[in-house]
Each structure stands twice: as structure tokens, then as C-alpha cells.
Amino acid sequence: MTSRAYFRLLQPYQYHSDSLFEFGMKLSTVAKGYIARLFLVFDVLNGTHWERIRVQLPVSVGDSTYSILFPQYPGLSECTTSDAFLVIWKIGYLKSIFKDIAQRGYAANSFRQVVFEVVQVESNLYSYCLASRVDRDPRSIRLEQPLYPRITGGSYGVVGGYTLDSLVFYPDGK
């Protein structure tokens, strides 16, 4: 995490909504594609018990007001000749998540974590995703389990691999 991202995550209201923060990562040499996502984790008091909720930060929204009514989430991206990437988000999306949580009517809420996740897929799984178009829905956040046959006869499903790497940031320093 860059120092710029660190300070903007700690105090998002000190920055203009169009301000940017970014996360980057070096990819595996065998990765053919990847999905990078950022989640905010909150503890909320729902009635008389605390619940942990996790909200994905969109990469864009359907309007210029930073409302999260029509969020668009990152899809599967092909690895380029470089083995590193950088994902950029706007502070306005972060503020919208905080505002949405505050307006949901919970008795209390507490911002606990920021989780940066990267799913790297190898070539067979990447080919499946392209052929079945599982990542074409910009409002979907899942990488579906494959039923796509790549073996002659077609009864074995897809043989492919992926890794899930995550970086967890605790804003309170604990």
C-alpha cells in the first residue's frame, strides 16, 4: 500500500471526492489473468447483537454523484507483458460506503478493516472465464465455479488453478 493510500483510507473526508488512491501488486509469472478487489469491513450493532459486514468498493458508479446505487466492480483482466499492476479508486466511492453504512439504521457501527484481495488465475481457468463470460456482469463480484469441459469427452469439468492473496489493513493499528 502506498503512503498516499494509507492516509486517504484513514481520513477520507479530508480529501476531495475525485482524489485517487491506489493499490498495486506483482503477479505470478504463470498467471494469465487477475481480479483485484478492495473490501471495507465493519462491525455493526443490529438490534442487540454485533454483526460483521464486508462491502466491496466499486471501481466506478453509474453517475457522477458517487452514489453506490449502480456500482461497477472490477472484472477479470488479462496479465500484460509486465508482471505488476496498479488499481486506482476514487475517495468518493469510499465516502459513499461510509455514508451508506451510517444511513442503514444500525444502532452503532465501527470501521474495522480494509482488505485488498487479488485472485490470480492460470491459463485454463482464464480461458474458461473468457469462453463462459462469467466476468461480463460489471455488478457481479464472484468468480463462478467452472463446469466448462476442457478435456476430450467433456465430463471432467475444467482443470485450472487460482490463488487468492490478500492484504489486511487495520485503521486503528491493532
Image (cartoon, helix red, strand yellow):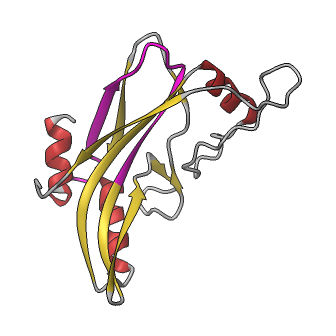
The residue closer to the viewer here, 90 or 29, is 29
Position of residue 8 in the picture relative to residue 133 (left or right): left
Q: Is residue 167 magenta?
A: no
Q: Residue furthest front?
A: 156
104 vs 127: above or below? below
Q: Residue furthest left?
A: 173
Q: Residue furthest right?
A: 153
> Residue at left 49%, top 57%?
63
> Residue at left 39%, top 21%?
27
> Residue at left 89%, top 23%?
153
Residue 16 image offset from top left, x and y in percent:
22, 53
Q: How many numbered marks are there? A: 0
Position of residue 50 in the picture relative to residue 128 (left or right): left
One can see residue 15 in this view: no
Question: Which quarter of the figure is the C terminus placed in?
Answer: bottom left
Question: Which quarter of the figure is the N terminus placed in?
Answer: top left
Residue 169 image offset from top left, x and y in percent:
22, 48
Residue 18 image offset from top left, x and y in percent:
30, 48
Residue 23 image offset from top left, x and y in percent:
29, 35
Per the rendered image, the range of residues in magenta is: 16-39
> Residue at left 59%, top 51%?
140
